[in-house]
């Protein structure tokens, strides 16, 4: 089992929002809208999020992905995911077309775990872009 742990800070929320916006909008439009509109909404959503400033733990194995934080948890089977997209500093896990979970690479304990996660994704049959 591979684990990623991190504190869900406002910075992590903004980074995830930027990457999801880039995926959802044409490249040039995303670069224009992200700094102006998306950040304000992301900050507001972050302040209302029960997971704000709490540690999030993700566990990955060949059958499923699990996430947990104080008072909440979730389980996904690989086949229920639409896509996993790797960006420079993390992964976006898409259970729905415009909804993604952010898992920063700094949450993994080593480069070996990051590589192991990539291998799990590739073996899962989920669309992967990285």
Image (cartoon, rainbow, N blue to C red):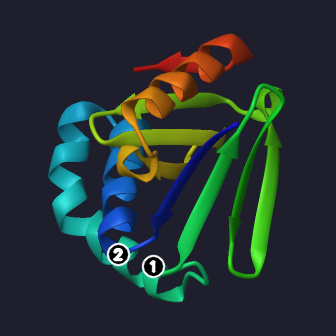
The percent position of residue 115, horizontal first and vertical second, equals: 46, 23
Total numbered circles: 2
- Classify mark 2: helix, strand or loop: helix
Residue 114 horizontal side relative to residue 43, left or right:
right
Regarding residue 125, the answer to whether it shows in the image is no
> Residue at point 68% right, 12% down?
123
Quadrant of image for the C terminus: top left
- Classify mark 1: helix, strand or loop: helix
- Mark-to-mark CA distance, 2 and 1: 6 Å
Quadrant of image for the N terminus: top right
Residue 21 horizontal side relative to residue 36, left or right:
right
The percent position of residue 117, horizontal first and vertical second, equals: 56, 28
Q: How many residues crowd around disc 1 within 10 Å: few (fewer than 14), some, or many (20 or more)? A: many
The percent position of residue 27, horizontal first and vertical second, equals: 24, 33
Q: How many residues crowd around disc 2 within 10 Å: few (fewer than 14), some, or many (20 or more)? A: some
> Residue at point 52% right, 58% down?
5
Whether tag 2 and tag 1 are in contact, CB under 8 A, the answer is: yes
> Residue at point 82% right, 50% down?
75
Give me the disc on residue 46.
1
Residue 121, placed above or below residue 87: above
The percent position of residue 99, horizontal first and vertical second, equals: 58, 50
In the picture of the structure, the residue carrying the numbered disc 2 is 10
């Amino acid at each position: 089992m591979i684990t990623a742990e991190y504190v869900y800070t406002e910075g992590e929320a903004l980074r995830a929002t930027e990457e999801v916006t880039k995926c959802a909008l044409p490249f040039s439009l995303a670069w224009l809208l992200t700094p102006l509109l998306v950040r304000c909404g992301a900050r507001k959503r972050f302040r209302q999020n029960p997971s704000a400033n709490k540690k999030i733990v993700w566990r990955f194995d060949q059958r499923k992905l699990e996430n947990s934080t104080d008072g909440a948890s979730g389980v996904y089977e690989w086949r229920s995911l639409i896509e996993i997209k790797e960006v420079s500093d993390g992964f976006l896990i898409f259970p729905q077309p415009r909804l993604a979970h952010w898992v920063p690479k700094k949450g993994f304990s080593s480069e070996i775990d990051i590589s192991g996660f990539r291998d799990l994704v590739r073996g899962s049959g989920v669309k992967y872009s990285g």
